[in-house]
Image (spheres, rainbow, N blue to C red):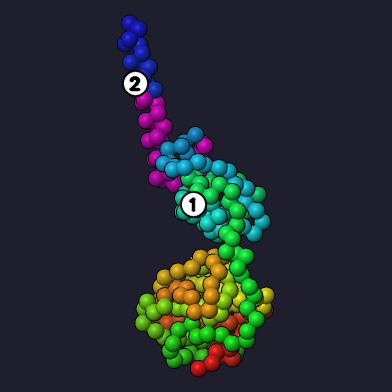
């Protein structure tokens, strides 16, 4: 009968769809295929609020910046595109940007506020005594100064600048921030507990950028603070005044 046939088709279709969902789920669970291998039709199962657009990665562009420019959480873009390491995106790669808020993807206007730092003196990133000084001796080299402080103590930008790194991809340093102050000078803040600024953020001197912790290779909670001049570690004490 016509009615029965219709029901059979509906059931068969339902079973087929269910089987595919179970199969994809099982393969993902066992790690046989990555999310990137899922046919684009199946990416529709991810709940998306707002329109989806395609973005071609420009040279030098980071996932952080793309996410910020579109007003979409970075984790969401990483998930839908099957990106496991957000630091490894390639120029020319086409990304699906879900739930776009800012359709133009135009750079943050605040970037224009970045004025190169011209001073010679840096502010202390936090108040405290130096427990371990800078040491250029290659046998017991120490590229910065250590300032012990309780976990959670605010860490402040030593000078105005632009955040060029916020993450934990550098072995030993734990969670850290790098701020560029001008063409030659940058500062590094390592072993942080929490990072409070992101790549491309513009900060003023004294802006709270992170909190003291003991992430990475650290004995006790402290800030490891470095000053780099033309990429060379120099003694921070030469830039700080009491
Ligand atoms: Zn140190």
Residue 196: quadrant of the picture: bottom left
Task: Residue 30: say if magenta.
Answer: yes
Image: 2 above or below 149: above
Q: Which residues are magenta?
A: 14-40
The kind of secondary structure element at disc 1 is loop
Which residue sits at x=36%, y=78%? 151
Q: CA distance from mark 2 to mark 1?
A: 38 Å
- Disc 2 residue lies near ligand 1 with CB under 8 A: no
Numbered mark located on residue 72 in the image: 1
The kind of secondary structure element at disc 2 is helix
Can the viewer see residue 215 in this picture?
no
The residue tagged 2 is: 11
Image: 5 above or below 14: above
Question: Taken as a whole, is the magenta stretch helix, strand or loop?
Answer: helix
The picture places residue 29, in percent across and down from the top left corner, at: 39, 45
- Disc 1 residue lies near ligand 1 with CB under 8 A: no
In terms of sequence position, does the residue under pointer 2 or pointer 1 come before the other?
Answer: 2
């Amino acid at each position: 009968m016509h009615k029965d046939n219709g029901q059979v088709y509906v059931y068969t279709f339902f079973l087929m769809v269910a089987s595919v969902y179970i199969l994809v789920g099982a393969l993902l669970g066992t790690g046989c295929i990555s999310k990137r291998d899922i046919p684009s039709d199946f990416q529709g199962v991810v709940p998306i609020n707002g329109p989806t657009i395609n973005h071609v990665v420009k040279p030098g562009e980071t996932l952080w910046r793309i996410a910020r420019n579109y007003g979409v959480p970075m984790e969401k873009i990483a998930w839908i595109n099957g990106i496991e390491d957000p630091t490894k995106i390639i120029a020319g790669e086409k990304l699906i940007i879900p739930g776009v808020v800012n359709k133009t993807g135009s750079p943050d206007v605040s970037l224009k506020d970045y004025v190169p730092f011209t001073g010679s003196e840096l502010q202390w990133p936090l108040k405290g005594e130096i427990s371990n000084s800078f040491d250029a001796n290659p046998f017991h080299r120490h590229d910065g100064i250590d300032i012990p402080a309780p976990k959670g103590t605010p860490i402040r930008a030593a000078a105005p600048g632009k955040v060029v790194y916020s993450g934990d991809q550098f072995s030993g340093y734990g969670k850290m921030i790098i701020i560029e102050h001008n063409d030659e000078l940058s500062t590094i803040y390592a072993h942080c507990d929490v990072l409070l600024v992101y790549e491309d953020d513009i900060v003023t001197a004294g802006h709270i950028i992170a909190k003291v912790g003991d992430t990475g290779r650290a004995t006790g909670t402290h800030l490891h603070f470095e000053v780099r001049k033309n990429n060379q570690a120099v003694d921070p004490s030469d830039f700080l005044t009491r």
